[in-house]
Amino acid sequence: MFNINPVEATWLAISLFALVVTLGNLGDAWRGWRDIRGTGKARDIQARANVRREGIMLTLSAALVIVIIPALLRSGDTPFSIYIVAIISIPAGLALNSYLDRRTRRTLEGLGAE
C-alpha cells in the first residue's frame, strides 16, 4: 500500500513531470532528426546528438522515478531535508534542460527557414 506524505508527493510529481517533458522532447528531437536526414552531414550529426541527449535524460528521469518507489512503499514518512531537496532538484534540472534544448531546436528551425 502507498503511504505518501507531502514531501514524497512533491518528489513524485516533479519526477513524473520531468519524465513526461523529456519523453515529449525525445519525440520532438526524433521527428526533427527524421525530417532533416540526408540534408547535410553536420545537421544530421547535430540532430542525432539531440536524440541521444534526450534519450539519456529520459533514462535518468525514469531512474529517478524508480528511486521514489521504495519511499512510497515503506511505512513512515520521508522527512524533509537538504538531501531530499538535492534529489528533487535533479529531475527539475533535467526537465528544464530538456525544455531549453527544445526551445533552442525550435529557434534553429526558424532560422533555417529564413
Image (spheres, grey):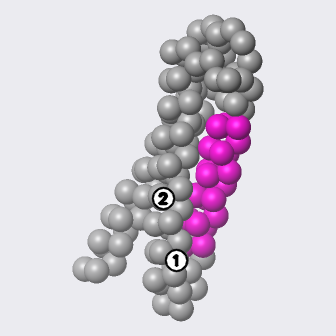
The amino acid marked with disc number 2 is Asn
Left or right for 57, reference 70: left
Determine which quarter of the picture holds residue 72. Answer: top right
The amino acid marked with disc number 1 is Trp
Residue 26 locus on image (x, y percent)? 53, 62
Q: Main secondary structure of the magenta part?
A: helix
Residue 74 visible to the viewer:
yes
Instruction: Name the residue rendered at 70%, 30% in the picture.
Output: 69
Near mark 2 (Cα within 10 A), the count class, few <14, some 14-19 or many ≥20, is many
Question: Which of the labelled discs sits on residue 33, or is there none?
Answer: 1
Residue 110 locus on image (x, y percent)? 29, 71
- Given residues 30 and 104, the one toward you in this image is 30
Report if residue 9 lies within the magenta region. no
Q: Where 105 falls versus 14 (above or below)? A: below
Report if residue 59 lies within the magenta region. yes
Residue 40 visible to the viewer:
no
| Residue ID for mark 2 | 25
Determine which quarter of the picture holds residue 50. Answer: bottom right
Determine which quarter of the picture holds residue 53. Answer: bottom right
Magenta extent: 47-66
Instruction: Name the residue rendered at 66%, 54% in the picture.
Output: 56
- Given residues 3 and 24, the one toward you in this image is 3
